[in-house]
Amino acid sequence: MRTCQSLSEIQSEIQSGNLTVSQLVEYHLNQIEENNGRLNAFLSVYGDEALQQAAIVDKKINEGTAGKLAGMIVGIKDVFAYDGHPLQCASEILNGFESQYTATCIQRLLDEDAIIIGHQNCDEFAMGSSNENSAFGEVKNPADETRVPGGSSGGSAVAVAANMCQVSIGSDTGGSVRQPAALCGVIGLKPTYSRISRYGLAAYSSSFDTVGVISKCIEDAALTLEVMAGSDEYDSTVSQTKVPDYSSFATGRKFKIAYLSETLDHQGLDKEIKERTLELVDELKTNGHQVEEGHISMLEYNLPTYYVLTAAEASSNLSRYDGVRFGKRAKSENLEQMYKSSRSEGFGEEVKRRIMTGTFVLSASYYDAYYTKAQKVRRLIMKETNKLLEEYDFILSPTTPTTAFKIGELKDDPLQMYLEDLFTVQANVAGIPAISIPYGVDSQGLPIGVQLMTRHFNEKDLLDISNQIITFKDQNR
Ligand code: GLN
């Protein structure tokens, strides 16, 4: 039994006259109306605008001029610029800020007639793993509302899980699309670094930041990626590599897969997640794939490398929020004090922690000991990861060490919170594509996610294997 309805299925219903885009928007607005008060997934909802847009798209459909994404209702994380709409990165420091242009990835969706229904809650400046670091309050996991949805794209994962939109656009710097997707039981796709333009994505850590997609159906993730990817004159770091036809991915090919024993034997890994992942290994073998144990020696260096480098880049990127150019300005006697007070009052605790850590690792006396060292380790992690991927098409592991934890449980223990990212950061350190696929639930009914990583620009095969896994998971229901 299939567990989702893809955009192409929705479009067939529209074509056969059983459904209109306006009705779809109304449906999602109702879901938001009913659930958002409790779940807190959306920060702003653009209801009237979405309905007006829907009427235009319905007309285009009737005239045969609609784009590829006609009928797709999209929510965007509060880190994407959307002209004339608020953008706060879930932070007090951007209070009252409105975008003056639209992010390239969002514009490409609009150009294909997708409808943006609102901006979604997240951890402040995308820093966090639980969505508790938002200036707008925590987001709740629909599977158990006493638990976190993961982060930082928590609102985006919840919105898809609770049918408030068809697809969400999030950002993944260290797992922020995959980890909440795993904890909420939906798909989270992080493409290759540089596959999608970052123009209009508020920068957290520029050499790691990647635009990603959260959806229920794999077809929707593929199509959304296809529309957003590709070169952009506004972002010179975007790859010129041709965008393949991602949406025709289902070849059913047999692959060679390595499962990482260092992740499965990790002491912090929940027993039930381990069991499910091993079940998947068996299932893949039964289905004719070659699955073997693979090893990486550097797992324990992934997190320190990630946290040193991203904090360094964040301290530089976030220096622009000075109380002068954007959002909040504190009242003060003199200019220097105004900068200090604006930043002290505007940023939350976790963001300040990272800015200070980043400033420290970049300071003259410690630069070589931390920043340069971490850059070297990053290179070694990339090398080791790429080597394993020369031999295997995919690296399989759990997405997260635990299922959704209780709200408040890890909030005062940043190190424990950082451990949530243990398995996801490797893909960002190496810049490779990765996906989290929902793979059942634990004995408490909490979703479990499995992660696959692959070679640079091998998204098409990644979608193919994901589709196969989802298909046999659905058959086993
Ligand atoms: N949870 C990770 C962090 O706190 C990842 C964040 C992200 O991918 N934006 O940094």
Image (spheres, helix red, strand yellow):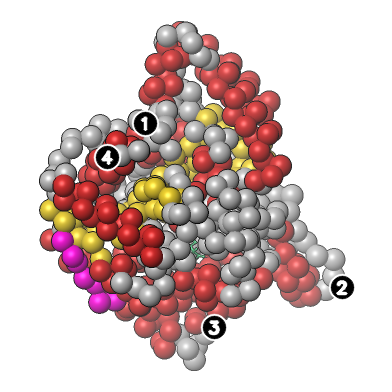
Residue 455 in the image: state x and y as whole percent. 23, 55
Instruction: Report crowding for label 3: few under 14, some 14 to 19, many 20 or more residues within 10 A (C-alpha).
Output: some
Question: Residue beneath label 3, please?
Answer: 360
Compare marks 1 and 3 and give the one earlier in the sequence: 1
Residue 6 vs residue 471: left or right?
right
Q: Quadrant of residue 341?
A: bottom right
Name the element at disc 4: helix
The front one of 243 and 272 is 272
Name the element at disc 1: loop
Question: Residue beneath label 2, please?
Answer: 333
Instruction: Specify the label residue 472 is tagged with.
Output: 4
Q: Specify start and end residues of the magenta stretch as a single range.
A: 292-298
Compare marks 1 and 2 and give the one earlier in the sequence: 1
Q: Identify residue type, mark 4.
A: Phe
Q: Residues under labels 2 and 4: Cα distance?
A: 65 Å
Residue 15 in the image: state x and y as whole percent. 42, 11
Name the element at disc 2: loop
Q: Residues under labels 3 and 4: Cα distance?
A: 49 Å
Establish if 81 lies above or below 152. Answer: above
Question: Residue beneath label 1, please?
Answer: 2
Compare marks 1 and 4 and give the one earlier in the sequence: 1
